[in-house]
Image (cartoon, rainbow, N blue to C red):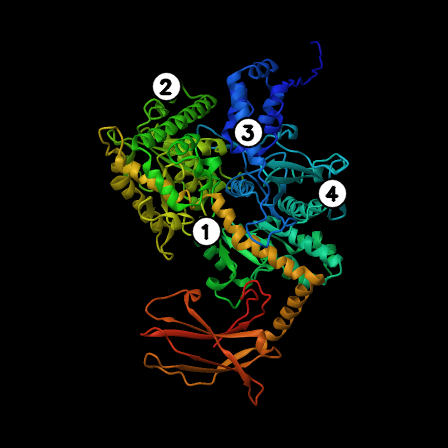
Amino acid sequence: MTTRTAFTVTVNPKIPARLSRLEELASNLWYSWDRGTRNLFSRIDPRLWGAVGHNPKAFLKRVDESLLQKAAEDQTFLASYNSVLSAYDSYHSEPLRYTHFEEFGPRDQVAYFCFEFGFHESLPVYSGGLGILAGDHCKAASDLCLPFVAVGLLYRQGYFFQTIDSLGNQQVSYTDSEFEDLPVEPALNDDGSEIHVQVSLPGRKVMVKVWRATIGHVSLYLLDTDLPENPLKDRMITHQLYGGDRTMRIEQEIILGIGGVTALGEMGIQPTVWHSNEGHAAFMMLERARKLVQQGLDFASAAEAVAVNTVFTTHTAVPAGHDSFSKAMMHDYFASFCQDLKISWEEFMALGHIPGSDDFNMTALAIHLSRTHNGVSKIHGDVSARICRDLWPQIEPEENPMTYITNGVHVPTFLAQEWSDLFDRYLGYEWRNKMCDKDFWLRIDTIPDHLFWSIRQTLKSQMFYGIRARLAEQNARNRGSEAHLDRLLKLVDPINPNVLVLGFARRFATYKRATLLFENLDWLRKILLDTEHPVLLIFAGKAHPADIPGQDLIRKVSYVSRMPEFEGRILLVENYDMRLARRLVAGVDVWLNNPIYPLEASGTSGMKAGINGTLNLSVLDGWWEEGYDGKNGWAVKPASDDTEAVLRDKDESQSFYEILQDQVIPMFYRRGKFGYSSEWVKMAKYSMASLLPRYNAARMVSEYVKKFYGPANKQGMHYAKDAFANAKLIAAWKAKVKSAWKGVSLRRLDTPGKRIDFGETMDFKVAAKLNGLQPEDVIVELLLCRQYKKMRLNSFKHVHFKFAGIDSNGEHLFELNYVPDLCGKQEYYLRIYPYHPLLIHPLEMGRMVWL
């Protein structure tokens, strides 16, 4: 046999001068939400566009030059091209806004750190909800023209590709990305050289290359260790998203946090607000503190200076979901770092300490070195406050500094183009600038019902075409017959999309209970097998490769879908990604979500469905507890906390069956003479009008600016002025309080009265042992409310005592004369806690004494 050597050569087409800015369009992730831009590339060669995974940069390297020449001579194409460029230039000509608050000036900037970012399938450095949320945050920051940069890691392998075999087993495959095909470019110094920085790991220095992705006005800097000068084990650090062992995880987090701060400094970027989206990036705070210590601050003052302008967002609803590392591992990686901070090893470990564990907890670190902390829905804020309660040991969870900002989704990305066109026609082009105006969106009701329904059916048809293609590919790979494929697709008819479609698409984790509707298969048969009112149930989602119970859920869905009576009525679609997500949220009729309460931190997929006229049927958890108003979908009330898991699942599945059988299906099929249900259209319209202005990313980021970024920026400057005088002051005061607080006590001197007449004064007098603290260091407080119902402490009326002198025993006296303004039986409490005007949250020290 003759031996031969294969040689390869890549021939790149020359882009015609008239289309030269296609390269610019391909390099800015603005295309991830501008469909006009994506349509340009698709029109040149639709088949290639699909083959390259809708990646404009990869497309331009592979498209036949003859097709580019043809497009350059096509007047219709050129008109579209010029229209896109006009919109692109108009968008990018908007100056960065420093006027949201007076606290923002021309040199101020927000830096947003996250482990993953999901903008578009062409940049696969995301796995799911956290990444998509981070991507939407950046897109909305760009839309608002905020001074904003983001920092992440550039993985060779993003999340895995999923296939599902004929028995429902998830098969996982990873593909290395070619960076030259991604919408990224090396970050450059002024002299044109690439920016590389060094990060210290045990016994070695790791070189890190900085890449830049552009998202409208926003720059995302991605860190990469896959460099020839690094040994193989270090080149692998940024190789795979959520890959490897604990060593890999801590090294990724060090590269992100410490390397990210170093990279921004190397580029001359000096953020004035820092945002850690999840605890993965919390080492960023340590590196910032180290730099301040190197400038001459003591660690306590440096920590205050860092924390005051740092925002921390947690997305996890269970304690086990928070990253932690063993004491031995932390010693290997941070013993010398601890010396740089000029603190003891015990002091360092205390930064990540959670009572009951010897591990170093990244959420604890993030909270200790930030002053603004939030969950991502109201319920999740409460859950996070309870999970983290030991970090403020004497403060009740409902009063501790953990708050919330409910997530939102980027409307231009996830709103189907058909809706955009319809809004242009009936609401006017101004709708894009009215994203958060609730009254404006009530105008959706002026859209004729038949047009609204037509759009819904069109989107369902498009979804059906996509699902047919995916299921055909699955069936062929699993060696299924054509007859079997016909059976699977019997209800998936793009020409006649009149079947009611229920969608469940998200990560297959046990708490999300993908199989809850299988609790009573007999009841499910009655719902799905009604020949007059057919129902199609579509599942999609991935389970983490290490999550065996999650993979078991996929197998169970597959098993039930293969039962003869359910074939073609329950479909399991593989490789859930952003492209499929956009089709499903816009195409299904009802979006299902059935998590175990209260474990759904937010649940943004339901928001994406809601803005597209898809109705939500969900457990009242996450965002839906806030969004549901009784008229814009359906809700399942979660079982009580003390209900056993088996009974809980039985009760809640029964609620789903009843709602589907008694409300959803009858309403959908109660069609009038025009072939659609006017009741359904009315509810879908109202759902869009009520949800879109509340659960969009513009509202979310504006809320971050108003509640967090603006105040953090202002306080950061306040702490830093005069060589960090206020940071030093608050650090010294906190040290004094911590030392004295064990000796602080409170006792009552007056005799409590049981009954008074309306208008009479209640006279309170207490004595406090302050153990060296001064009266101005504390607040003595009365909390009072009616006793007719249990109220949260932050709902009580709060009234402060006045200092009234020192008695002969050296105790400080405090008095209050208060006239209650309500009648009836009232409940009240007395307490004392430390206070200083420089505190960001009045209870941030976590110290309190109740009488």
Q: Which residue type carries mark 4?
A: Val
From the viewer's side, name the closer residue of 167 and 163. 163
Residue lying at the far left in this picture: please name it. Answer: 673
Verify CB contact (< 8 Å) between mark 1 and mark 3.
no
Badge 3 element: helix
Residue 796 found in image quarter: bottom left
Residue identified by numbered label 2: 483
Q: Which residue is more in the foreground, 669 or 69? A: 69
* Mark 4 or 2, nearer chain start: 4
Q: Which residue is mark 1?
A: 377
Residue 240 seen from this side: yes
Q: Is residue 492 above or below residue 216?
A: above
User: What's the mark number on residue 86?
Assistant: 3
Callout 1–callout 2 Cβ contact below 8 Å = no
Query: Which residue is tagged 4?
Result: 197
Secondary structure beneath disc 2?
Answer: helix
Dot 2 crowding, Cα within 10 Å, few <14, some 14–19, many 20+: few
Does residue 236 lie above or below 42 as drawn? below
Query: In this view of the protein, can residue 45 be seen by the observer?
Result: no
Q: CA distance from mark 2 to mark 3?
A: 50 Å
Question: Does dot 4 land on a helix, a strand or a loop?
Answer: strand
Q: Does residue 588 appear left or right of residue 381 in this picture?
A: left
